[in-house]
Amino acid sequence: MFNQGGLSLEQAPPISVVMRFFITASVFGVLLGIILFTNFTGIISFNQSNMQLIIVHSLALGVMASFMLGALFQMLPVIAGVVIERPTEKVMIVHGLLVVGIVVQLFAFNIASIPLLYLLAVFYLGISLLYALIIMIRRVLQIQDHSSSSKGVLFALSSFILAIIFGIYLLLTSGGYIDGVSFLKVKELHYTFAIFGWVSLLIVSISFQVVEMFYITPKYPAFFSRYLVVMIFILLLVKSFAIIFGMESQIITMFLSAIFIVYGGVTLHRLHYRKRPTSDATVWFWRLGMGLLILSMFIVFINTFTTLPNNIIFISYITFIGFALSIVFAMVYKIVPFLTWFHLSNQGYMEAPMMHDVIHPKKAKIHFKIHVAMLITWFFSALLEKADYLIVFSSLLVIASFGWLLYHLIYAVKKYNYTQEHTEKVEW
């Protein structure tokens, strides 16, 4: 997976750093399914009801932020040569405060009559996320010669900081600590930088390196990889100014969605012409993710010059979530088996399990089928009226999807610990 010439044991953080975040994300994914099952509220909406806020932030922070922060602690040494000193100590702070902050925030949304919960959520989440992002940004800024991936990661991290700052404003407003005159504008800015900036831009940036590295594909066009992330970030800044000053921003949204459609198409083209055309569930996840991104952005594009029905707009949310989760799952199934083998073999354990022994590719294929079934039920629950039975079924599939991943992550940890405790280590 990784070229060991570009990744040493000294550069790579301990495997516990990554697994801590991945397991936490999977637990929150199971929790998300339980919330959906017990409340019959559907998958997601950007309205302001408390339950919808709980669903959105369980997914956005509990699942996506946890997965992505864990992946970044691992990927920065690979894609940018960035080394974070004392990663275990720093991750203990980030992870602990993040989990507490997410839980407090969900309780704040559920018990809106206790303003102190909003303040505590600001405290825990603000310290955790800003501390992690500042650590990463400082290291990325020290790079002398940026690649397309490292430059894009910098823009993605900057977008996440802006999304967090806007989120803090929204929490303080909801808790009654500030008047919130600009609440609606800030809310739109918060979602814009979280969706188009943090999630999308990070996936785009990492794909420039990992798609070619993992799957031996043709390189992205030089102009495309060099300027795409810059164009996206500039458009986000222009859109934010339009929102702040009450100007029309639909044309910018149209350009953004068109860019992501082109990106999805180019990535699918690269995957089609990979040099190792073997059956691999992670390729399936990437292809599905790109297809869903194209569909989601196509709906957004059409909606900029006409008014689409609410259920069609709802599908754009579902397909975007499916895109983000598909890429996350593809990355996890590549990262975890490799890291288990990499750390054990570099520690001198001659009987270190091979990658297929950690998580067998057939297990990833089963997860892919569960994931597709989940997305299909989401899709039809949006199209069909009075489809409560589909919402119930889809929530059970959410539990099954993240539960399946959680089981195999825990199995990988046990495999790692068993090898350390029961196999012979060769001293170099």
Image (cartoon, rainbow, N blue to C red):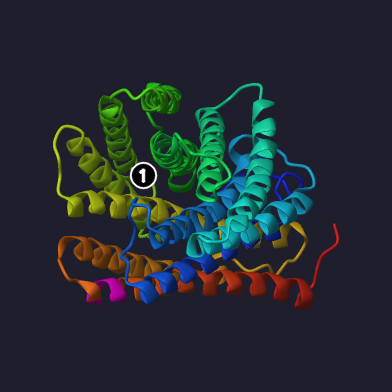
Q: Kindly identify the amino acid type of the residue bearing the numbered disc 1.
A: Arg
| Quarter assignment of residue 409 | bottom right
Q: Identify the residue under disc 1.
A: 274
Q: Was residue 314 drawn as part of the magenta stretch in this picture?
A: no
Horizontal side of 68 relative to 277 (left or right) equals right
Q: Residue at x 21, y 61 (%)?
A: 382
Is 401 placed left or right of 78 in the picture? left
**At x 45% / y 67%, what residue is drawn?**
32
| Depicted 385 relative to depicted 237: above or below | below
State whether the magenta stretch is mostly helix, strand or loop: helix
**Residue 228 percent location from the top left of the image:** 40, 26
Q: Residues within 10 Å of mark 1 (few under 14, many from 20)?
A: some
Q: Is residue 339 visible?
A: no
**Element at badge 1?**
loop
Nearer to me, 424 or 158: 158
- The residue positioned 80% from the left and 68% from the top of the image is 425
**Residue segment shown in magenta:** 389-393
In this view, the residue in front, 113 or 390, is 113
Can I make out residue 30 in this image? yes
